[in-house]
DNA sequence: TCCTCAATTCGCGTAATTACGAAATATGGA
DNA sequence: TCCATATTTCGTAATTACGCGAATTGAGGA
């Protein structure tokens, strides 16, 4: 996890439609969701949807798998964990007691 | 935590200088760091620094406290936790087994 | 009050992002 | 091969973000 990866990932999430897409994928689970289904649910034009999915993919936040004629998009949970670890790296100068309970999320 | 808050927060972090500032604040700890010290460490012009700090503040990622002539900036760990929870809300449709170990970070 | 340091606000030119129609490409069935 | 469905690429115009010099505000000491 380096800085430029994190910037791309945060930038990808810093958009109304893309954030909605990503959260939808999280709720759908690791099995993935076909692009067209996402577009139907969120009422997005194909080219707009495709652009956003490409942004999320470039940022490493989603993985893709072609199945027949469809492309299934799935969230990458490891990317989220990586982002959090990167953000809180060397938290409080390594002093566990200073940030106890703060650096751990219970989603 | 609502969507527009999350968008502002991710947008604030999606920038080289601001991400560096935030991570520096995390490492410095909850006691806060004077703005000028941040600027000196990262070699930033006052107006540029101030703009970035204002963006982080608006996004709810940092808190400020005036001490004498200085303004100390501190990271808001609760905001980070809130973002992660928001991102992973209803993960895998609530099926714990499907995302076990994925939704929890050990920073 | 006057001065100085700390920090913010304003203004401007430049650069990146956005949505989406139209055209192109990919996949599999008839 | 021909076609329909699924998805991506391209082009363009409108919007927004960027850095930073200059001017301004705030707080405390002399």
Image (tube, coloured by chain):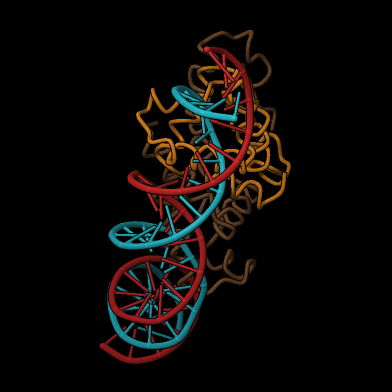
Chain colours: A orange, B brown, C red, D cyan
How many marks the image carries: the answer is 0
Residue A95 point in image, percent of width and height: 71, 40
State the quadrant of the N terminus of chain B: top left
Q: Is residue A59 above or below residue B65?
A: above
The residue nearer to you, when weighing A47 against B74, is A47
Q: Residue at x 66, y 47 (%)?
A: A5
Residue found at x 52% / y 10%: B94
Query: In the image, residue A102 lies at what x, y percent?
Result: 59, 32
- Which one is nearer the viewer's eye here, B14 or A52? A52
A28 to B48, vertically: above or below: above
Viewport quadrant of the C terminus of chain B: top right
Nearest the viewer among A2 and B76 is A2
Image coordinates of residue C24 in percent, x first then y, are 54, 46
Tell me residue A83's x, y (percent).
63, 39
Residue D11 found in image quarter: bottom left
Q: Nearer the viewer, residue A34 or B76?
A: A34
Residue B62 visible: no
Q: Residue at x 42, y 45 (%)?
A: B8
């Amino acid at each position: 996890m380096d800085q430029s990866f994190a910037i791309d990932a945060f930038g990808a999430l810093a958009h109304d439609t893309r954030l909605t897409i990503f959260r939808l994928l999280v709720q759908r689970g690791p099995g993935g969701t076909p692009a067209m289904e996402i577009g139907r649910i969120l009422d997005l034009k194909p080219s707009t949807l495709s652009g956003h999915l490409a942004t999320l993919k470039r940022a490493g936040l989603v993985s893709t798998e072609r199945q027949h004629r469809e492309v299934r998009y799935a969230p990458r949970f490891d990317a989220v964990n990586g982002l959090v670890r990167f953000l809180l790296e060397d938290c409080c100068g390594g002093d566990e007691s200073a940030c106890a309970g703060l650096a751990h999320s219970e989603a």
